[in-house]
Amino acid sequence: MAEGSRPLPAPTPETKHFWEGTKAGELRLQKCDGCSHVYFPPRPFCPSCGSRGVSVMKASGKGRLYSYVIHARPTPGFTAPYAIAVVELDEGPRMMTNIVGCPQTPEALVLDMPLVATFEKQNDDITLALFKPAGK
């Protein structure tokens, strides 16, 4: 997918646990200690009840393709076409990501298909969580 230099996120104190997890090959989510709501993206409070009592948990890394668009225009750092997807994780939250490991076509990208996380190191600080079809 990468062609040249891909734009990378800038970690913050609130997202530090997530980026440490991706470097370790883990998908880490947050869970509210009060109402048990599991959420993404990272933030210092529960988006469901507002509690600041939250814990970090290791997610299964499994999910299903919820939605996607195939981007076909040239974009710095990417080779078109590529899928920009929303994956619904088994734990409940949805996250935006890219799908890899399969053709970037509507025939290959079937809604609700099982996916599994894969991790792609970009530099010493950033490893991206991407998703590929389960079993590949």
Image (cartoon, grey):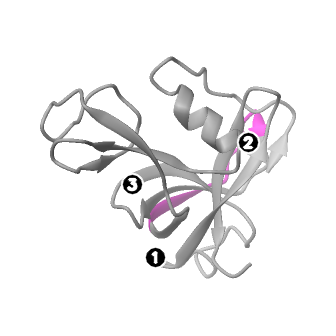
Question: x, y (%) of residue 67?
Answer: 43, 63
Instruction: Check disc 2 and report its element: helix, strand or loop.
Output: loop
Residue 134 place in picture, x, y as percent: 63, 77
- Label 3 – label 1 distance at C-alpha: 14 Å
Nearest the viewer among 71 and 114 is 114
Q: Are marks 3 and 1 in contact (CB under 8 Å)?
A: no
Residue identifier under label 2: 74
Q: How far apart are marks 2 and 3 (CA)?
A: 26 Å
Q: Is mark 1 on a helix, strand or loop?
A: loop
- Residue 89, image x, y percentages: 43, 62
* Residue annotated with mark 1: 111
At horizontal 79% and vertical 48% (from top left) the residue drawn is 79
Q: Is residue 97 left or right of residue 52?
A: right
The alpha-carbon separation of the residues under discs 1 and 2 comes to 25 Å
Q: Which amino acid does label 2 sit on?
A: Pro
Label 2 crowd bin: few (<14), some (14–19), many (20+), radius 10 Å: few
From the viewer's perspective, is residue 88 above or below residue 43? below
Residue 71 counted in the magenta span: yes
Query: How far across and down, in percent of the image, does residue 114 sit?
Result: 53, 77
Return the disc, 1 or 2, that comes first in the chain's sequence: 2
Tell me which segment is drawn in magenta.
66-77
Which is nearer the eye, 117 or 87?
117
Q: Is mark 3 on a helix, strand or loop?
A: strand
Placement of the C terminus among the 4 image quadrants: bottom right
Q: Residue at x 51, y 79 (%)?
A: 113
Q: Residue at x 35, y 54 (%)?
A: 93
Q: Residues within 10 Å of mark 3 (few under 14, many from 20)?
A: some
Q: Residue 7 carries which label?
A: none
Tell me the residue that label 3 is attached to. Answer: 94
Please tell me which of labels 3 and 1 falls first in the chain: 3
Please tell me in which quadrant of the rendered image residue 77 appears: top right
